[in-house]
Image (cartoon, helix red, strand yellow):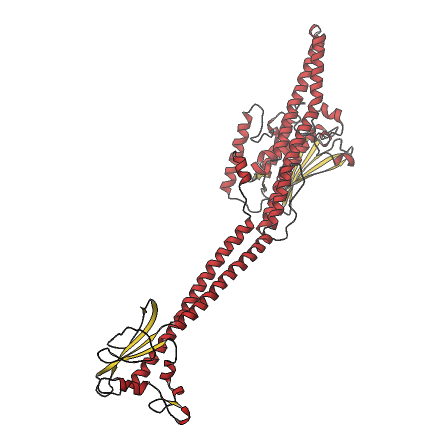
Amino acid sequence: MTQSNTKQKRRKTSLKWKWAFFTSIGVLAIVVIFSVLIFNRFTNVLLQQEHAHIDNTLSTVSSRLSNYSSPLSKGDVAYYLKPKITSDNDQVTQANGNDLYSNSLIVNFSRDNILVNVYDVHGNELFESRKGAVKFYSPSKRKIFTTRQNGRQVMVGAEPLLSKKNGSLVGYAQVTDKLDNYRATANKLLVILVILVLISVLLSMFFAYILAQELLRPINEIQKTINEVKADPDSDARIPELKSNDELTDLADLLNGMLDQTQRYIDQQQQFVEDVSHELRTPVAVIQGHIDMLLRWGKDDPEVLEESLKASLQETNRMKSLVSEMLDLSRAEQIEINYGEEITDVNHVFAQVYNDFKMIHPDFTFTFDDDTDHDVYVKIYRNHLEQVLVILLDNAIKYSTKRKEVHLSLSTSMAMVNIAVQDFGEGISEEDKQKVFNRFYRVDKARSRDKGGNGLGLSIAHRLIEAYHGNISIESSLGYGSIFQVNLPIMQDMPDEADLESDEKESTESSESQDNQSDNKLPDGILDTSKSDQTDSDNSKHEDPKDNQ
């Protein structure tokens, strides 16, 4: 039998039954402990009452028989302890003339479980209140204790009888309590407590099951949703909103977020495959066509050979650029996983990119308005912010027409830092503005390809900014240029300066290590376009709105 079959045959124990069982065990333990304490306390009270009865009986017997100065005889004891019936109305009286029913000794004698015995100084029995085999004890002073007689527990009180006149020993008094009433009452109490324990356990199990069923109902919803997603990974099933406002609600929200993220990654992967296959179809067809032409007659025609080789090389470079940018975009979707705690000085990065572009494009006029009073820090990886700025500036340069001028501004508003890049080029229409951040979108595909664009630059910038909880927007007027604005949340709780210096050093070392890589990529695969030649016509890492489709 395989392991899978074993698992299938293994019976599953519901969490509700486990909860009910262990709750019942807990209640059972508490009720049992409580019952034992009550039982012990109650039986102790009963024993104390029996002890008091014996003590009272001994005191009564002793007070009546201690008037003699010589050892007791049967007649002496009978005179004081046995009642007499007179002929007058058959009235029952005691030897001293008291009414029997008002006499405390006779009341004690009337109890079924009490045996009163009187012995002489030699231990010979002189009196017994009722028949019963008892053992004689001759203590030196009054003593009340429990012992076993005839296999049963009894309580015995024994006392030497001393004469009040001369203090001599005149006999012994002994009271034996068979504890029948005590045992009967204790047994009744024990039965009641056992019934109480059973009822408590059953009720606790019932209510625990009901409570567990109610509390675990959200888990059933979670399990149902997970099974639906497991059966169909593309399913849009999500855990319905839970109103319990407890840990299960937090778990449901967390699972929904995880499912959304997983679905987003699946969609991105599918989109990546579809986009690459679609975009690579054209360059592959072009290269194939030139190779076919070379095989037919290009070998003997140097002009055809050179043209075909150049065209094939150009398409190859474009495919390389396209694949690199697609990888950049795919990896940008996982920014929050790899770079969630990076901190960057916006002023420093902005000034660096501004100076780099002034040096690379001397034919352009760059203006920089810095309206911040001090350095502004945001939670973003330095190279990612630099890449976004390079994309926007590169687009501004590519699509500037007669007025070769680019304006840059940096300002703060409330808890956000605003970065603006303005060009005075072609601009785009209202209809196209809504699509500029889509993948591979181009307003003018022919002109965009001439400028080396793949339509991915702004998509990369848009995804990078969104990954760091910011936003990017565009204002444009056809024929007058465009303004791109980037807003990022400012760090409120600033780290220590030592930590900032350490982060800056790590970012610098990371940038230097990227320069030594042949593909000029960041650690996560995003192209470090700030280090590439901005004038290369085949550089398609940064696109204008017209480059994005």
Residue found farthest to the top: 300
Q: Nearer the viewer, residue 474 or 228?
A: 228
Give the total number of marks visible in the rendering. Answer: 0
Name the side, left or right, on which 93 lies relative to 264. Answer: left
Write the residue at 69% across / 27% down.
454
Write the residue at 32% across / 82% down.
59
Q: Nearer the viewer, residue 75 or 350?
A: 75
Residue found farthest to the front: 87
Asked which quadrant contains residue 57, the reply is: bottom left
Q: Position of residue 79 (x, y in %)?
A: 30, 88
Q: Would you place residue 68 above or below residue 261 in this image?
A: below
Residue 43 visible in rendering: yes
Q: Position of residue 274 (x, y in %)?
A: 69, 28
Residue 392 visible in rendering: no
Name the side, left or right, on which 313 lies relative to 154. Answer: right
Q: Position of residue 537 (x, y in %)?
A: 68, 23
Q: Nearer the viewer, residue 310 or 115?
A: 115
Q: Would you place residue 389 above or below residue 144 in this image?
A: above
Residue found farthest to the bottom: 88
Q: Would you place residue 513 above or below residue 489 in this image?
A: above
Write the residue at 28% across / 85% down.
77
Q: Quadrant of the C terminus?
A: top right
Asked which quadrant contains residue 186, the reply is: bottom left
Asked which quadrant contains residue 520, the reply is: top right
